[in-house]
Amino acid sequence: MADKKSVVVRCKLKWSFLRKKNDMSKKYQLDCTELDAKAVKALKGIGLVARHGKDKKNPDPDAGWFVTPKSMREPMVVDSGLSTVPDEIADSVGNGTVADVEVDAYSAPKAEGGVAPGLLGVKIVELVAFRSSSSLEAEAGGFTVPAASAALAGGPTGTDDDVPF
């Protein structure tokens, strides 16, 4: 590996786990996608090899060149003014968020070249907030939590029948 211990690369984020660990890797991680030639070269300078999305097991050519830095420790997440980002915002970082990501290289015998990308910190430049669904609308007369809670507590259920069960 080269002398430089870490690099900062600008990328688009995918699958960010910044405040809870990924269930599969048991680490904080993100995919740092759409890396340009300068970022790929900088990563190579610290001994890391970027992969291309078209070569993934489940091809994702739109990802372009990417790395997946990981960490056992919760990474620093800041805004463009370097103020700490609150957890509720860090939890909502969605795919397509533009960020500067500080990446280092650590020894990992099973990884390509014997080194793997570590996740040190994230500066969010343009936030794309994750939303689980944006096309659902409220429906009058449908299921609601307050009505269900009342029914479970033995309150009125909204039915007028006298069936004893």
Image: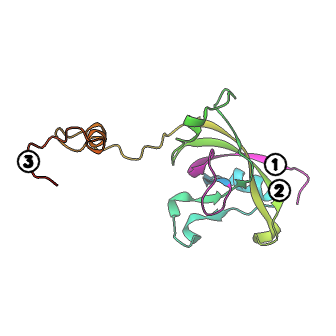
User: The disc labelled 3 sits on which kind of residue?
Assistant: Asp
Q: Residues within 10 Å of mark 3 (few under 14, many from 20)?
A: few
Look at the numbered disc 3 and give the secondary structure of its residue. loop
Q: Is residue 5 magenta?
A: yes
The image quadrant that residue 145 belongs to is: top left
* Callout 2: SS: loop
What is the number of the mark on residue 162?
3
Identify the colour scheme used: rainbow
Instruction: Determine the residue positioned at 62% across, 48% down.
Output: 20
Density class for disc 2 (Cα within 10 Å; few <14, some 14-19, many ≥20) is many
Q: Look at mark 2 in the image and give the residue it sits on.
A: 46
Q: Pick whichever, 124 or 143, lies toward us.
A: 143
Which picture quadrant has residue 70?
bottom right
Q: CA distance from mark 2 to mark 3?
A: 75 Å
Left or right: residue 94 compared with residue 39: left
Mark 1, Cα crowd under 10 Å, few <14 / some 14-19 / many 20+, is: many
In contact (CB < 8 Å): disc 2 and disc 1: yes
Instruction: Select label 2 or label 3 by which is in front.
Output: 3
Q: Looking at the image, do the residues carrying marks 3 and 1 touch, with CB atoms under 8 Å apart?
A: no
Q: Secondary structure at mark 1?
A: strand
* For residue 56, above or below residue 21: below
Q: Which residue does the numbered mark 1 point to in the structure image?
A: 6
Tell me, yes or no, whether the two marked residues, 2 and 3, touch with CB atoms within 8 Å: no
x and y percentages locating residue 143 in the rendered image: 23, 44
Locate residue 40, reporting x and y percent. 71, 56
Amino acid, disc 1 = Ser
> What segment carries the magenta color?
1-27
Residue 31 placement, left or right of 104: left
Disc on the earlier residue, 3 or 1: 1
**Farthest right residue in view:** 3
